[in-house]
Amino acid sequence: MALCKWVSLIFIVVVIMPLLISSDHSLSPEEVAQIPVKFLDHAKRQELFDFMVGVRRKIHENPELGFEEFETSKLIRAELDQMGIPYKYPLAETGIVGFIGTGGPPFVAIRADMDALAMQESVEWEHKSKVPGKMHACGHDAHVAMLLGAAKILQEHHHELQGTVVLVFQPAEEGGGGAKKMLDEGALEHVGAIFGLHVAADYPIGSVVTRCGPFFAASGFFEAVISGKGGHAAIPQHTIDPILAASNVIVSLQHLVSREADPLESQVVTVGKFQGGGAFNVIPDSVTIGGTFRAFSKESFIQLKQRIEEVITRQASVQRCNATVLFNERDKPFYPVAVNDKNLHEHFRNVAGDLLGPQNILERQPMMGAEDFSFYQEAIPGYFFFVGMKNESQGKFESGHSPFFRVNEDVLPYGAALHASLATRYLLENQPKSTLPKGSFHDEL
């Protein structure tokens, strides 16, 4: 891993003697409010807009799945090198962490996910995916372009930053839990807060969508093999039918929500996989079922996991079958609840209000979907939001994970400006207090 001496050196200096970037040159409230406006104007300049569009289209043409984003990572590193931004690489196989600013506290992170989905693109256009069976169908190509756009803006103002902005380019959001691996490898060392965003096809361009508190549910997956005794369908008395057992299991699993969960607390148990048998007149030896479970509290999530295993094994036993239940946390880690920090919510509303106008900050109810940004939020204060990209004059924009998913590239400047503004204003508002006596500043280490 290439550890940046620049970051280490300046961090040592600032930890010993925090830099007070001219308290006598502090910005007025009016000047602070203008930062997001100026950043959006910057992001909309043709040169920067074309840069983001070009990056997004290159990545879209060459989609890579989780922990396989080697070419995407290479492209990002080349752009950071071109901008003169130091970084650490690799983290979590293909991840990158860049640094802009003083190299000292405060530290704030802004994050983009890099991975694509295993699906065939059905949109016919000049920059369609060149890789069969892989597609950027959730906008992560746009997220990377936005973060690189923000990096350009911030790097042009790096002498004015009153702290350090950490750029987090993360692999494997789509089920791989890349955020957890980035955390485990020190991606957020010294960081006090982190912001993340996602494009949204169902909200208008120029708007943002968010909420304070729980936003996404905790999520996990399960798979069970129910084993019986196969035989001819005409003589079921000589068999132990795993299909019948699995059917009873699925019905019983639905009772976990309808009869065991508090009606005022949202939970989900869904079986989406049922594999068993291959002939009309043969009872198979075994059946495999699988699904997902979601909840908005850690306690409810743990309880659901325990009860899913109990219901599957005991219901199978009633039908004289055996069952093995796997949660496979290694390959598909459980995602915690994503909770937007209360203080960061106020910060976001202030910044986004200055950039877009308060009327364009929309609120959304909690969703049962999952987002591995929640791993960051479990470790430090974090904030996640959506950036609208709907424009009816450009036709319908399908939601994520559709083979017809498109990105309205007019959204790119908004994402870049929001990233840069949230980070810059956070640094201004969270300056460390000097503990040195007056007159004790020295140039030498």
Image (cartoon, rainbow, N blue to C red):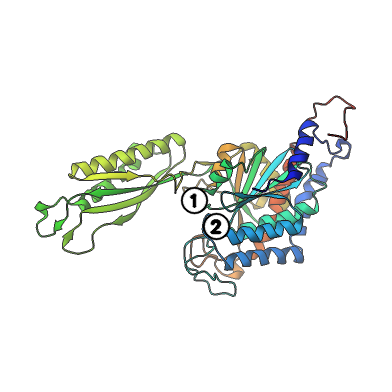
Residue at the (43%, 34%) spot, across then down: 299
Residue at 56% x, 58% y is: 69
State whether residue 200 appears in this view. yes
Residue 355: x %, y % from top left: 72, 52
Numbered circle sitting on residue 115: 2
Image quadrant where residue 71 sits: bottom right
Q: CA distance from mark 1 to mark 2?
A: 10 Å
Q: Are marks 1 and 2 in contact (CB under 8 Å)?
A: yes
Q: Residue furthest front?
A: 1
Indicate whether 319 appears above or below 60.
Answer: above
Q: Amino acid at mark 1?
A: Gly
Residue 270 % position (x, y): 36, 49
**Residue 164 in the image, given as x and y percentages of width and height:** 74, 43
Quadrant of the rendered image containing residue 64: bottom right
Q: Is residue 314 above or below residue 392?
A: above
Q: Amino acid at mark 2?
A: Asp
- Residue 438: x %, y % from top left: 88, 26
| Mark 1 or 2, nearer chain start | 2
**Relative to 203, is 311 on the left or the right?**
left
Nearer-the-camera pick, 378 or 91? 91
Question: Of 122 and 86, which appears nearest the observer?
Answer: 86
Q: Which residue is mark 1?
A: 176
Neighbour tally class for label 2: few under 14, some 14-19, many 20 plus, Cα within 10 Å: many
Question: Which element type, helix, strand or loop, lies under badge 2?
Answer: loop
Circle 1 sits in a helix, a strand or a loop, which is it? loop
